[in-house]
Amino acid sequence: MPASMMRGLGEHDRAALRANLATALDTVVERLPGSPGETYLAGRGIPLDVAQALRIGWATTGMLAGRVVFPLCGPDGLATSATGRAANDHTKP
């Protein structure tokens, strides 16, 4: 969610959104080992332990399915959003 929209929310709502995002990121990080995403990252010189430390993961469902997921963090280091990169040419944009 863009920062401009987050400012319009109450603290409770912002905290709930961040908690949901953190849970989603935990899930995709858990799915990375053995996935096509791990292979994709290894081919670019990024070992699994580094990817996991950076909270990079693999999405199997939702809008980012079939993509390597990268968290986007604010100045405080907390994830505010995520983006994905298709691991192969067969994933639709």
Image (spheres, helix red, strand yellow):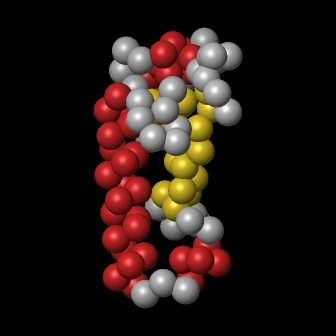
Above-or-below relation of 13 to 88: below
Query: x, y percentage for residue 33?
Result: 36, 21
Give the residue furthest to the front: 92
The total number of labels drawn is 0
> Residue at 37% of width from left, 48% of height from top?
24
In this rendering, position of residue 27 left or right of residue 48: left
Above-or-below relation of 43 to 47: above
> Residue at 34% of width from left, 63% of height from top?
19
Above-or-below relation of 55 to 77: above
Query: Which quadrant of the rendered structure holds the N terminus?
Result: bottom right
Residue 93 is at least partly visible in this image: yes
> Residue at 59% of width from left, 77% of height from top?
5
Residue 77 is at least partly visible in this image: no
Closest to the observer, 88 or 44 = 88
> Residue at 50% of width from left, 21% of height from top?
37
Query: Which quadrant of the rendered structure holds the C terminus?
Result: top right
| Residue 83 figure quarter | top right
Query: x, y percentage for residue 43?
Result: 60, 12
| Residue 90 figure quarter | top right
Query: x, y percentage for residue 26?
Result: 33, 44
Above-or-below relation of 78 to 72: below
Query: x, y percentage for residue 57?
Result: 45, 34
